[in-house]
Amino acid sequence: MSPNLKAIPLIVLGVLLNAAAQICLKKGLQAAGGMQLAAGPLFRLMLEPWVIAGLACYAVSVVVWLGALSMVQVNYAYPFLALGFIANALMARAFLGEAMTPMRWVALCIIVIGVGLQAWSGRGH
């Protein structure tokens, strides 16, 4: 199996962890009642469990991403980050109740096609 194919699970896991981080951070902000640029409220926000979970997801995603980059070229792996748009849209809809317009779904489909073409081109075609 080629290194490019072996790296895809790590790349996708990194993207999903990054998307999960966004959702956790948003839930943390909602639980804390928003963000205020003062030391006390910022400190309390940083202690919010959802914010801690979001930061943990980011930290793990970096480690996973380093594993992926050790296997493939950056110009192969990086376009997969666009899949984060799709993951974020689906997670935001599922966990935050955010709406998606039909035009955004079309845009996300175009992203999927672009990432697919990028991945396919990396296989030597």
Image (tube, rainbow, N blue to C red):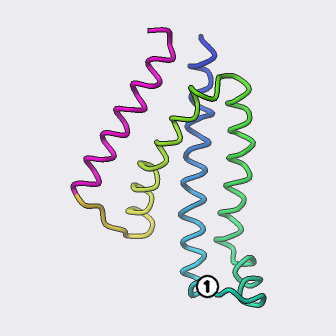
Element at label 1: helix
Please determine whether, in this image, residue 28 is positioned above or below residue 117: below
**Per the image, is 44 magenta?**
no
Please determine whether, in this image, residue 72 is positioned above or below residue 94: above
**Residue occupying the point 68% across, 54% down:** 58
**Per the image, is 106 magenta?**
yes
In-image side of 46 versus 78 (left or right): right
**Looking at the magenta stretch, what is its main secondary structure?**
helix
**Residue occupying the point 62% across, 42% down:** 14
Please determine whether, in this image, residue 48 is positioned above or below residue 61: below
What is the x, y in percent for residue 86?
41, 48
**Placement of the C terminus among the 4 image quadrants:** top left
What is the x, y in percent for residue 96?
43, 69
What is the x, y in percent for residue 97?
37, 70
Q: Which residues are magenta?
A: 102-125
**Residue occupying the point 59% across, 35% down:** 11
According to the picture, the residue beneath numbered tag 1 turns out to be: 32
The quadrant in which residue 74 appears is top right
Q: Nearer the viewer, residue 8 or 123?
A: 123
